[in-house]
Amino acid sequence: MQYIPALDGLRGVAACGVVLFHLSPTTFFWMWSFVDLFFVISGFVVSGIILNSLDDKGLSLRNFWLRRVLRIWPVYYLTLFFVVCCVLLQQGSDQFLQDQSGHARLASVFLQFTPYYFLENTGPWQPYYFLPGFFHSWSLAIEEQFYVVWPLFLMFFSKWKSCNSKRALIAIAVVLLCVMAFSVHARSNLQWHPYMLLSRLDGLVLGSIFALLYCRGNLSTQVFRHCAPMLLVIGGIGATPYMVNGLSVGGSAHDFLAYPGVITSFSVLYLGLIMAVIFNPESALSRLLASKHFVYLGAISYAVYMFHVPLLKFL
């Protein structure tokens, strides 16, 4: 898959949207959904990388995971170090340890893979009281878990030559959509936190299906161009009740728990946006997102995302 500068620009826009949301959650109440824009982009880009590797010389899991680690962990653990230092300066080491619920629970947050799998479901934000200013790392945990599971899934199916056929691609897409539907059902019944991989698969699944069709589907550019506005309309219609409620009552951003399908709707909307940007490169929006300033913003978007919450909280 060739490099698409406009996607970096979209990453930058997503990061800025999340910053605005945290600055004023009531004014920009819907911009929490830009995290799901990140997920759609990640699903598309990472799946494309895996599929290209499988087509060339085969996928090296060791190299793939090592590159993910080198991309994510330095900024992640630097942010964690900054947060712990700020908490220690504010509270002192004795008070800090007294305020926490034991090293075992803290370790699950530090290691980023397990917070919501082993902590009691006592409210959507409860685990993050253990380490103020680091709660937004839940999205990185989801991405890390996706990077572990998804290449194994694609490698398993790549062993069959028929998996390149359109029929097999459709079957894989149907399986992924069923998994996503199960995820939405679990989220709607509050069986799982909405900050786990198993309950936040919408954007990652849709981005991955798009990558499968883009890399293996042999579909024309015209097909994707026609699909983009349809997805924008479908996603917009699905998100409308949530948006209308938020605008009318100035509702809390976390009212999305009362609208189980709103995460899916925003993910569909953002998939349509990504398609429109990729397959209409001459449009004003695509040229703007591919400009050097937006590309640079996309290059630092991960650091902006990780550091803005502790900076806002402690400074």
Image (tube, helix red, strand yellow):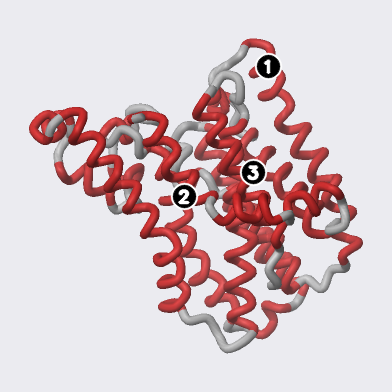
Q: Tag 2's secondary structure?
A: helix
- Label 1 or label 3, whichever comes before in sequence order: 3
Q: Amino acid at mark 2?
A: Ala
Residue at mark 1 to residue at mark 2: CA–CA distance: 31 Å
The quadrant where residue 106 appears: top left
Residue at the image point whose x is 24% and y is 41% from the top: 84
Q: Which mark is residue 303?
A: 2
Q: Amino acid at mark 1?
A: Leu
Q: Say above or below: 219 vs 58.
A: above
Question: Which percent across, then down, holds residue 171?
Answer: 69, 65
Q: Is residue 148 visible?
A: no
Q: Quickly name the residue at label 1.
A: 247
The front one of 249 and 157 is: 249
- Label 3 or label 2, whichever comes before in sequence order: 3
Residue at mark 3 to residue at mark 2: CA–CA distance: 14 Å
Residue at mark 1 to residue at mark 3: CA–CA distance: 22 Å
Residue at the image point whose x is 43% and y is 59% from the top: 72
Q: Amino acid at mark 3?
A: Val
Residue at the image point whose x is 37% and y is 29% from the top: 313
